[in-house]
Amino acid sequence: MSTIRLRGGRIYDPTNGIDGEVRDIGMRDGRIVELHPQEKVDHDYDLSGCIVMAGGIDLHTHIGGGKVNLARMMLPEDHRARRERDTLLELASSGCCTPGTLETGYRYAEMGYTAAFEPAMLAANARQAHMEMGDTPILDHGAYVMLGNEEVFLEMLARGEDFERVRDYVGWSINASKAMGVKVVNPGGISAFKFNQRKLDVDENHVHWQVTPRRVVHTLARALRELGVPHPLHIHASNLGVAGNIESTLATIDALEGLPGHLTHIQFHTYGTEGPKKFSSATRQLIEKLKGAPNVSIDVGQIIFGQTVTASGDTMRQFANADLGNPRKYVGGDIECDAGCGVVPFRYREQSYVNALQWAIGLEIFLRMDDPWRVVLTTDHPNGGPFTSYPHLIKLLMDKSFRDEQLARLHPDVAAMADLREIGRELSLYDIAIMTRAGPAKLLGLSDRGQLGVGAAADIAVYREQSDREAMFATPEYVFKDGSLVARRGRLEAVPTGGTHFIEPEYDPAIEKTLERHYRQHLSIDWRHAKISKDELCSCSNHGSLLPCKLHGGGRT
Amino acid sequence: MNTPTLAPSPTAEHQTAAGAADAPWTCPFCSLLCDGFSLQDGDPPRLIGSDCPRALKSLDAFVRPPKAVTPTIDGVTATLDAALDAAAARLAKARLPLFGGLATDVSGMRQLYRLANARGAVFDHAHGDALMHTLRPLQDRGQLFSTLAEIRSRADLVICIGTDAANYPEFFRRIAPAADGGLQRRTVFVGAQPPAQAIDRSSVGRVTGQGDLFDTVATLAALVDQRRLPDAAPELIELANAIRAARYCVLVWEPAQLPEHGALITEAMLRLAMSFNRSTRGGMFALSGVDGLQTANAAMSWLSGLPLRSRVGPQGLEHQPLQFATARLLANNAVDLLLWVASFGTHLPPPSASMPRIVLGHPMLAPHCAGGDTVFIPVATPGINADGHLLRADSVVALPLHAIREEGLPGVADIAHALATRLARAAKATR
C-alpha cells in the first residue's frame, strides 16, 4: 500500500488535544504513521487552507434493518429525485430520508463520515441488519442489539432470576447477534403494548410481567458494566414525544444510579408542560441534571424542517402518533416476542408551534451542554431529519446570526419566546470535532478511531476552510478511508467494503440451556440458528473486515 | 480499490459449508423457512420429521440425473465459459432487459443488482402480481404485521381470510401454541373451508361472508367500528364481537389467492386491523413470499431504495408497480431480453418470449430452454447443493440455508458475477 503525506493542514484532533495546529500527517498501510519530513512518499497533498479531522462517526443512525427497509418500500415518493451518478463507481441508489444502503454509504462518505452505527438491531432481525450494513459501502459499521422488551428477559426479571444469569443472557445476546452494544427502547414498553398497555412510566409496572422500566434500565446498565462493554447502555427513554416527559427522562437518569448510560435523541425526551399550549422546553432541567451526572452522555436527535420518516422500535409511542403521519400511512409490527417496529412518515413544519419548539430545544441542548465529550451530533436519522442535513446543523451551531435568521422564520410564539434567542454561544471547530468524531469514538470504545494520532486508523476528512460552514462540511476536499482516497470534492474516488465492529463479552454458557428451552417453547426458529457465527457474519456483511472491539478492563474475569 | 463491487467474490457462499454439518436444515421451498426438521441426502433427499406435501413435492426435483446437465446455447450443449460468453454478448446487445423470476437468495440478488447496473434492467419476480397485492397498500396506507412467534405465543383469535393455508402446509403447526402455555385459541375461516387436519376441530369456526371477500372484510371493519349496519349477517356481527373481545387477533391471508383487485382487499384488512388495534391488539400475517419473493424484494429495496418492479436505468431508478409486470412487458415487447432466474426447482419454467432469453435455472429446466435464442445455465439450489440466506414470510427473520450435498453447480451469484465481469471487460475494451 502507498505512503501518503498530508502537508500543511490545520489539525483538529481533540483526542490528542490538538486545536488547530498546522502539522503534517502521514499514512501507510491504512494507518497513521510518523513520517520524516524528507521521507519520500507516493502521494503528497498540499493542504494549505484546509482543516483536517478524523473521519466522522455517527453513533446513532438508522441505516439498516427491517423497519428502515419497510420505510423505503413505503415511500417510493422519497426516491423520485434523480441525481447524476458516476456510473464507473456508483451503483444506482436513491432516496433522501429513506436512502438505499448504497446511497447511504456514498453520501456519508462524500460528507467526510467513515463509520456509522445502527442503534436498533432486533436480535430476530440481526442477520438482515448486518446484510444491509454490509451493503452500505465505504463506511465501517456496527449495531446495538435491542434488549429490554424480550419476553425471556422480562420473565427472568419477573421471576427474580439471579442477576448473574441475566448478565449472562445479555452477554450471550451481544455475542449471538454480533452487536457492538445494547440499546433499550421504551424499557418494557414495547412488550407492554403487546399486552394492550398504552402508557408506561418509569415506576409503573408492566401490566403482565409486573416489572418497571426503572428495573429494566438498571439491570441492563449494570450487566454491561460488568461485562466490560465499552459503550454505555444506549437508552431510548420512556414516553418519547410526550409533553412533560422530562420527568421520565430525569427518572431514567436516576435509575442508572451512577452506572454509565447514553440517553439517545434526548431532544424528543426534554419536554415540559408549561405555557398556554402545555408544551415547553425543559432544557434547563435536563442540563442541570446532566451536570451532576457525569455517567450520562447524550445525543440530540435534532429535528430538521421538511419531509422525513420516523422509524422506531417504540410501537407504543409510534402507534399513538399514527394519525399524525404525513403522508398518512403507518407501518406497525409485533416481532418474535422480541421487540417491535413502527414507521410514521412525518413533515416537520416551521409554522407548527410544536415542531418549532422541538427545533429550538435540540439546539438549546447542544449549546447549553458544557461538556462536548458527552453530547454527540445526531438527527437520529431519519427520525429528526436525514443525515445529509448535518452540515446545515453544524452551521446552526457555529453561526449565531444564521441561527437567528432561521429562528425568525418559525412559529411566532417560539420565535419570540424561545430561550434559544438568549444563547450567544457559537461552537468552535474543536467542539464540532469532538461531537462528530472524538466523542463518539470514545463513547464506543474505539480507541484507534476518531483521532489522528500515530497508529490510528487512517480515516481522515479534509475540509477547505470557508466561512460558510454548511458548504464547508457538505463537500470535503478529500476523504480517506483506511488510508485510501474515497472521495474528493463531492465525488467518489473508490468504493471499498466497510468492516463490522462488534464485541464478544464473556458469559457462562450454562445460560444456553435456559434459552434453548425458551426457543423451543415460545419462538419460531431452531435454537441452533439463534447465533450468528463469525463465518456467517462475514457472508452477511458482504465479506468486509471483522473488527472485534476490546472490552473494558479485559471483560469479566 | 476502484471497483464498485458489492462483494469481492460471491463464490464462498455457494460452496458446501463443512462447518454447517451440525446446523439444522432450513427448508427453502416455502417462505415459512421451517428449520425444525431435517433432510437426509438421497435421490430424492429424504425429509425427516415432517410430511409437508409441498416440501416432498419440491424434493422430487432433486433426484440426481444420471449425467450432469450442462449449459446449452440455443439448445446445443456448451461449456460454461461458452454459455457465459454467449449470455454476456446477448446482454451487451440488449437495450432494456428484464430480470425476471428472481427465485434466488440474498447473494444472488446482490450480484444480479450489480449486473443490472452494467446494462440497465427492470426487476420483477415470478410472483410479482402477488407482491403488488401487499406492496401497493403498503405504499398507500401502510401495513400491520405480526410474526410467527408472536402468533404462537399470543394470538387467541386467528382469522384466515379467503385461505385455508393449504399452500403453506406447516403454517398451523408453526403457530400452534405451546402445549403447556395455557393459551386458548379460536381459528375462524372466512370465505374458505377449514382444512381437514392441522387444527383442533373444536376450536375452529367458519364464516361464509357477505358478498365477495372485499365486501365481507369491509363489513367486518364497519362492525368492529361499531357502525350500525342493519343488513349485516349475524355470523359477521358475532365475529366482529369476537375480534373486539380478543386479546390478540391475527388476520391471515394469502395474496396470491386474491383476485385482480387484491390490493383493495388487503387495504380493507388493514383498515380492519388498524381499527381493532385502537382498543385491543393484533396484527396481520401474509402467507406470501415463496421462491425468494420476500428476499428479492427486500434486497432490491435496501440496495436501490425502491422495491421490485423497478428499473435500474441510465437516468436512475424508476418504480412502476403496474407497468413493470413481467406478463405485460413481455406481451408488449417493451423489453428486448429476458434473464430468468429460477433456482429453487422446476415449477417456474421461463415464460416463452419473442426475444432472447438467458435462463439461470434448476438443471431440470433444461427441456424448457431447448428452443432458439436461449442460453441456459444450470445453477445450484440454496438449501440443497448450496448455502445461502433467505428472508421469511414476515420479512423480519432471515435464516441461513445449508447445503446437504455438493454437485459442483455454480450459484446464481457466481453466474451474475461472471456476466458482470465479462460485460465490464467488454466495455473497457471499447472505451
Image (spheres, coloured by chain):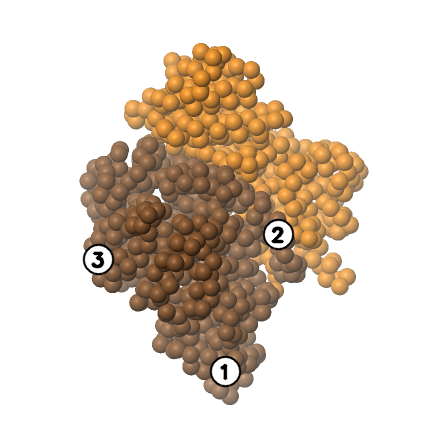
Q: Residues within 10 Å of mark 3 (few under 14, many from 20)?
A: some
Q: Position of residue B10 (x, y in %)?
A: 57, 51
Q: Identify the residue at image location x=35%, y=34%.
A: A194
Is mark 1 in CB contact (under 8 Å) with mark 3?
no
Q: Does label 2 lie on the same chain as label 3?
A: yes
Q: Earlier in the sequence, mark 1 or mark 3?
A: 1
Query: Which residue was labeled with disc 3?
Result: A258
Name the residue rendered at 39%, 65% in the picture.
Answer: A435
Nearest to N terminus: mark 2 or mark 1: 1
Residue A461: give x, y in percent of width and height.
Answer: 49, 70
Q: Which residue is mark 1?
A: A8
Say which quarter of the image contains residue B330: top right
The chain painted brown is A
Rendered view: B228 above or below A246: above
Judged left or right of residue A34, residue A75 is right
Q: Residue at x 29, y 50 (%)?
A: A274
Three-letter code, disc 3? Gly
Which chain wears orange?
B
The quarter of the rendered structure image containing the C terminus of chain A is bottom left
- Please state which of residues B175 and B104 is positioned toward the viewer in this rendering: B175
Q: Is residue A390 visible?
A: no
Query: Which of the numbered marks, if any, corresponds to residue A81?
Result: 2
Q: Residue furthest bottom?
A: A38
Inter-mark Cα distance, 2 to 1: 39 Å
Q: CA distance from mark 1 to mark 3?
A: 44 Å
Name the amino acid type tagged 2.
Ala
Q: CA distance from mark 3 to mark 2?
A: 48 Å
Q: Amino acid at mark 1?
A: Gly
